[in-house]
Amino acid sequence: MKDNEKQFEKFVRGIKFDDAPDPKHRDKLEKDLLAALTKQTRRKEPPLTIWRTVMKNRITKLATAAAVILIAVLGITILDKSATPAWAIEDTIKALEHIYSIKMSGIVTDVNSETEIEYVLWAKPNEEGTKSGELCFEVPDQQIIIVTQSGTTYRYHPGPNVVYVKEYKDFRIDPWLGSEFFQRVKRFVENWKISYGKDEETGRESIFATCVHPFKAKSWWFQFDSQTKLPVRVKQWTNINFEGKPEFYAEKIEYNPLLPDGIFEFEIPEEAKVVKLSQKLPDYFNDPNVGLSAEGLTDEQACLAIIEDYWRAIIDGDWEYLAQLRPICNAENWELKYKRNENWPIEVLEISQPSQEKGCNIGPVVPCMVKYSDGQIKNIKMIVKIRNIDGNKSCVIAGTYGGIKDFER
Amino acid sequence: MNNNSKAANDGQIIAEARTDPAAFARLYRRHYDAVFRYCVHRLFERQTAEDVTSEVFLSVVENFGRFKGSEQDFRNWLYKIATNAVNEHLRRTSRQNGLLKAACERAKSRVVDCGVSMDEAAKKLPVLKQAVLTLKPRYQTIITLRFFENLKLTEIAEVLGSSPGTIRSQLARALAKLRKKIASTWQEV
């Protein structure tokens, strides 16, 4: 036993609580319990609240926003700050505010096998403008992937005439090539080099920009149209030297294009074989060694308990506990996140009641209002997964829902 | 609840208690005291502790059908439910602030409830209350289970669904925070 423990033991020694149980209370409670037990055995099934019943039904569908991200090549978690060409980026950010859909074509390269896939896609952003919502991705003569408004993903292989159906989004553009993406670029990416020229095909005046992100070992090349300020071509490499083939190349980007009728609706072709696929959930969803016990709590109470503890752990820097409640990484990496992040939550202003969100089939969503170290207030929706593992009820934080948004009154 | 032989018999009683109310009553009587004590050590108030103890056992009745463990598991399960019930009570009623205020007032007036005699122990109690209740619920739980219920780190880890190593470091943090809060009294020890 360590010194502090010994000293505390000494401190509490002799403190006597009036903790002798009252036989009257014990006896009365016993009667109440036996009455409750008798009543319960008469019922065929234990009562459940409507809310819980609804949730259980939804949970069986099992979907997660954090599953497979196939067009995540644009995804950057950029951490470093440096001088930026504000003139160009600001204009681009503003111009992108009025974009409601895109058509993009180009090449995706598997950097290991150097396999190239030509694609063309149409997409709309989600409501928050953070990721794609409805989407149609075509690889000529190979497959067509469509994500519908309801969130169902259809992957059609014309050759064998097979449709794979998933009741969740497993294909998206994340982050959306919009204002928010370029705000992050402006803030964190470094080594900007700007030049001016003309578009090789149209001859339109263009701005060419390169930049790198040393920590994530990525580099980018952008071409912006001088008049519209919108990016019209993008390349991304998985190194900081622009070496080799870019893993992602958007050769042509059109904004607010005329969308073909029914482009985001999928009809299963005649005689096609339909294969329904269930979602693979992260292993920790069923790991009894992570999360928080919810024994004796309603689902709503459990959600509030784990979310409250989560923010406390974030703010107090209790990395081990944080890794237990939200095990997306271990304690060391949580601490690393904190050290590398200039802006960190410092105060929880409000935790609202859990609710079911359309499109989130993992579990209840808990809206939180959080103040960050830069003084800004953000709205963050946390998803809680309620589990019952070997008869033990517990919960774990599955992630955030809909991204982090600035507080709006 | 620390008694091994008591725990050893729980397995049989648990099986019987699923169908026999008399066996359930025996099981209840064997664990009532420990649950009540744990609640009073967490909440520092008899009346509230009795209310929460009632909630705990009503929850046991409601969920007993899905409890699959054996003797030791049952005790840990009770502590889990009791911990959640206490934390939920604190959260729901903002009891913490009220208790703190009350503790401060009592410390000032030297009026001691809880039946403690007016000796040195009596002087320490309000200080302890005030300090412990400002800790976050998880730390309160660890302190109470470790020093008042005398659970081992491995047992606390089981109750809280964590590893003993994590509990060890959280205990150290909790004690460090407590030490700061009750520095002057602590030094008198």
Image: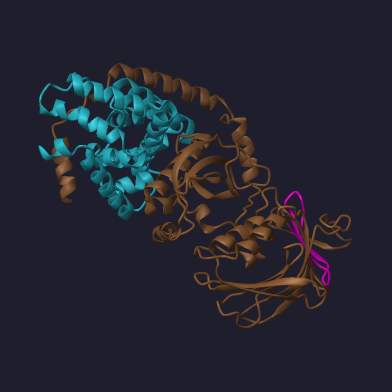
Chain colours: A brown, B cyan
Quadrant position of residue B70: top left
Residue in the image at 67% along x and 57% along y: A93
- Does the magenta run of residues contain A386? no
Report if residue A254 is visible in the image. Answer: yes
Task: Answer above or below: position of A42 versus A339.
Answer: above
- Between A21 and B139, which is closer to the camera in this rendering? B139
Residue in the image at 44% along x and 61% along y: A340
* In-image side of A94 versus A266 (left or right): left
Quadrant position of residue B85: top left
Span colored in magenta: A144-165
- Between A296 and B144, which is closer to the camera in this rendering? B144
Task: Answer above or below: position of B134 versus A239.
Answer: above
* In-image side of A198 versus A304 (left or right): right
The C terminus of chain A - image quarter: top right
- Does the magenta run of residues contain A149? yes
Report if residue A289 is visible in the image. Answer: no
Residue A396 image offset from top left, x and y in percent = 49, 48
* In-image side of A47 versus A160 (left or right): left
Residue A133 image offset from top left, x and y in percent = 72, 53
Task: Answer above or below: position of B39 versus A151.
Answer: above
